[in-house]
Image (cartoon, helix red, strand yellow):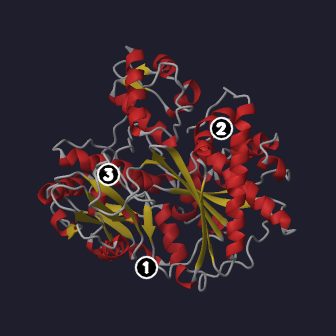
Amino acid sequence: TVGAEDSFFTLGGDSIMSMLLVSRARQAGLTITARQVFEHKTPAALAKAGVSVTEDDSPVTHEPDVPVGTVPLTPVMLELAEKAGAAALSGAVSQSMLIETPVGLEYSRLVAATQALLDHHDMLRARLADGHLVVPAKGEAASAADCVTRVDGADGVDLGEAARQAAERLDPAAGVMLQAVWFDAGPDLPGRLLLVAHHLVVDGVSWRILLPDLVTAHEGGDLEPGTSFRRWAGTLAEQAVSAERLAELPVWTRLLDGPESRLGKRPLDPTVDTPANGLHHASLTTPVATAQELLTSVPAALDAGVDEVLLAGLVAAVGEWRRRRRRNLAGGVVVNVEGHGRVPLSPDMDLTRTVGWFTNSQPVRIDPGTSEYAEIRAGGAATRAVVGRVREQMRAVPGDGLGYGLLRYLNPDTAEAMAELPSAQIGFNYLGRFTAGSAEESPGGPASGSAWQPVGDNVLAGTGDADTPVSHVLHAEGLVRDLPGGPELTLSLTTPAGVLDQAAVSALAEGWVAMLSGIAASAADAVPDDTESPLVSLDQDQLHALQSKLSEEKD
């Protein structure tokens, strides 16, 4: 249950959940903003600050929204094409999720539910043509019967091979953007459903929409509408040449310009540094108690988002690693920070129900501003300083953060100047929190009570072309799985084999976990600053409870 005075942040909310809360509050009759969630935190305070939808006389112009037709490529798509070649857009770049299916699932109902997804979420029907996407009308694209494959799963199957084959069946040029493989374990046992979608039409948030919608469609319910991806992408292109975005150019230049010492043995070479030529990887999981602190107490006490906390630990680990090797630390390091990118570009846009690749990628120069790395590991006073410094540098980017991509890829007059700015050596992506079911991947096991929930160690998996050049010297990811025993935070680092060796990647991963453990330990002694709070991650049940309590308080 959620109380009237419970804080959104100590419950563990993040920026994605705050966006969903704003949307659901409006559906319940209350208008609030993400900024008000920052400031007021609790259902009681938000109910007082919000305005009843019927009383809200703010002028809102509802622009025409035609979801079918030509869709311009967005900055994240053009970035992939620039770094890996235009052919990469039609390659095997996909995301996938393995979920448990309920006992007694019928093939015909699964096909019907999948068809409902294709009909409702327009981008799942899109095709790639001549440097843009085209969304056809319903009935003019691949049908669910062509997308759903049934496999006898009673005797065990090779899930990895099945995922590879499903990804190979994707064909953006032909409009085949989704594949579903049902591992049927028989009428008396739960099965598994592997969903594979081309990255051009989904992102991490999209799966939080697709899974509940699949359940709703399977049960015969109606799917809620949202703003089309086509309208949002078109508005991006319009804003890229606006005076407001052009005014951001000198700010981005000032923030990114500066010295940049090499992180690896040599610069990246796109002809050599590919997955096919080898990658080094390290992945570590924090203890549950540490993860719990990092997701709740630490953000509340240090006035930072979960992503900012994780990034602070990462740059501290990189700084310590560099110092041990007597490398130059001046100027910090440029980090490419990925975010969900779902920024409504007009008051009437609602992107909480839209499936598509919204990801925003923005470079940020991060300087930890300290060399007291042993103190950070020990949870000393330096932890608050490093988190605060990273937080301020992250929030110094102009506007909503979309401007870099717009000026770099959608405005021909500014693209060259933006391309000359220092590029990021490190890529960072906090994927957020996912509710996970049984850890058992194989179909045919006992029912876990987690029907339609992700299973397996990799909640959200991805594939790519083995010959695609690697974008960063070091790629860092964080993902949380909410398990019955508590949250599990997994931190992963990847690098091309010829740029950093395995020992270096393992040392950096160990350092990242150690820095975060120190930051978590410091939270107990930190004094919360209530002037501003982070956007931190609730699970779906807590979000519904918070929305209900918000409605009760308003009444």
Alpha carbon separation for disc pair 2 and 3: 31 Å
Alpha carbon separation for disc pair 2 and 1: 43 Å
| SS of the residue under disc 3 | helix
- What is the residue that sits farthest to the right in this orientation? 326
Q: Position of residue 442 (x, y in %)?
A: 33, 64
- Judged by depth in the image, the label closer to the viewer, 2 or 3, is 2
Left or right of 195: which side holds 189?
Answer: left
Q: Position of residue 97 (x, y in %)?
A: 37, 60
Quadrant for the N terminus, please: top left
- What is the residue that sits farthest to the front in this orientation? 446
Q: Quadrant of residue 200?
A: bottom left
Q: Is residue 143 above or below residue 120?
A: below
Going from N to C along the chain, the mark reached first, 2 or 3, is: 3
Find disc 3 in the rendering and name its residue: 210
Mark 3 neighbour class, 10 Å CA radius: few under 14, some 14 to 19, many 20 or more? some
Q: Position of residue 171 (x, y in %)?
A: 30, 74
Find disc 1 in the rendering and name its residue: 87
Which circle marks residue 335 in the picture? none
> Residue flagged by tag 3: what amino acid is it?
Leu
Tell me, yes or no, if residue 414 can be seen here: no
Going from N to C along the chain, the mark reached first, 1 or 3, is: 1
Q: Quadrant of residue 444?
A: bottom left
Alpha carbon separation for disc pair 1 and 3: 27 Å
Mark 2 touches mark 1? (CB < 8 Å): no
Q: Position of residue 540 (x, y in %)?
A: 39, 38
Name the residue at 28% across, 60% down: 193
Left or right of 343: which side holds 369?
Answer: right
Going from N to C along the chain, the mark reached first, 2 or 1, is: 1
> Residue flagged by tag 1: what amino acid is it?
Ala
Find disc 2 in the rendering and name its residue: 298
> Residue flagged by tag 2: what amino acid is it?
Val
Mark 1 neighbour class, 10 Å CA radius: few under 14, some 14 to 19, many 20 or more? few
